[in-house]
Amino acid sequence: MKVIPVIDLKDGQVVRGIGGQRAEYRAVQSQLVTSASAGPVAKALCSVVQHQHLYIADLDAIAGAAPDWNAYDQVMTSGAEIFIDTGVATPDEAKALIEFADRQSARASIVVALESSFSPDDLADIFARIGVGRAIFSLDLKHGLALTSAVAWKGNSVLDIAACATEIGFERMIVLDIAAVGIDQGPQVLDLCRAIRAADPNLELISGGGVRSVDDLRSFHEAGCDGILVASALHDGKLTRSDLQNCDVLSR
C-alpha cells in the first residue's frame, strides 16, 4: 500500500480541505513548509512519503474555471507521478489534460470523478478518450451518499456505480467521502471499500479521508486498499517520515 499526498488548489494556492465545505477552504498552514504555493508544498510532501505520487484536486476547475496549468507545472517539478482532477465532464475537456500528460517526463494520470459526470454513457466516452493506462475513476461521496446531481446516475446505489465504472474498463478507482476530509474523525468508507474489493479483487483501490495515524492506514489496508490519500495528517505532523518508514503495511 502507498500513501498519496493530496494537494487541493483554490485561487492559485494550496488549501486545506475541511469536510467538503469548499467555500470555507483557506490557504494551508503546515508544519512541513511555510509556503502555500503548489511547488514548495509538493516537494515538502514528497520529502515525507516513501513513494512519489501526488493527487491534485483543482477546485476552481472542478467548479468550472480554467485549469491552473502553472500550478500543475510547479507540482511536476517535484518529480512525482500525479493524479489530477479538474472536473473532466466530456471527452473534449479531457483532450487538454491528455496533451498535458503527454508532455510530462513523469507520469500524469487523469481522474474522472462521479461529481462531474453526466451519465454512464458520458463516463464511457471519456474513458475511451483517456485510455485505461491513465484513467482513474473517483467514486465521490458526501455523508455516505453518491455525490452527483446528474439525473442519469440517480437510482443507482454506490455499489452499482462502482460496478458500472469497472464494467466500462476502469482498473483504478478512488473511493472518497469528502465529508470525512480534514475533520480528524477517522475513516468513514471502510465497509464500502471491503465490498468493492470483494466484487473486484484485481481493481487498484485508493481511498482516504479522516486519516489520523498509522492505525488508520492499517484499517484501510485491511479493507483492501492499495493506496491512501492523506493531507491534514502530514501537514499537522500526525504522520511523520519515521511513522511511514516503520509502518508495516506500506510497500517498500
Image: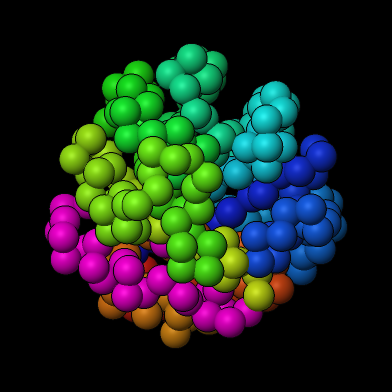
Task: Say above or below: 67 vs 157.
Answer: above
Give the x, y percent position of residue 139.
41, 52
How many labels, in total?
Answer: 0
> In percent of the image, x 66 and y 66: which residue is there?
19
Image height of 249 relative to 201, above or below:
below
Residue 227 as seen in the image, left or right of residue 163: right
Q: Is residue 94 magenta?
A: no
Q: What quarter of the picture does the N terminus occupy?
A: bottom left
x and y percentages locating residue 4 in the rendered image: 49, 56
State the residue at coordinates (76%, 43%): 10
Span shown in magenta: 184-212
Find the residue positioned furthest to the bottom: 215
The image position of residue 159, as x and y in percent, is 28, 58
Does any portion of residue 81 appear in the rendered image?
no
Note whether residue 192 is visible.
yes
Residue at 52% x, 38% y is 116
Which of these two is toward me, 217 or 128? 128
Q: Quadrant where the C terminus lies?
A: bottom left
Quarter assignment of residue 59: top right
Residue 202: say if magenta.
yes
Rendering quarter of residue 166? top left
**Left or right, residue 1 beside residue 187:** left
Query: Residue 37: x percent and y percent?
Result: 79, 44
From the viewer's side, name the closer residue of 206 and 188. 188
Q: Does 196 appear above or below 140?
A: below
Q: With respect to residue 173, does 96 lie above or below? A: above
What's the residue at 25%, 62% (across, down)? 196
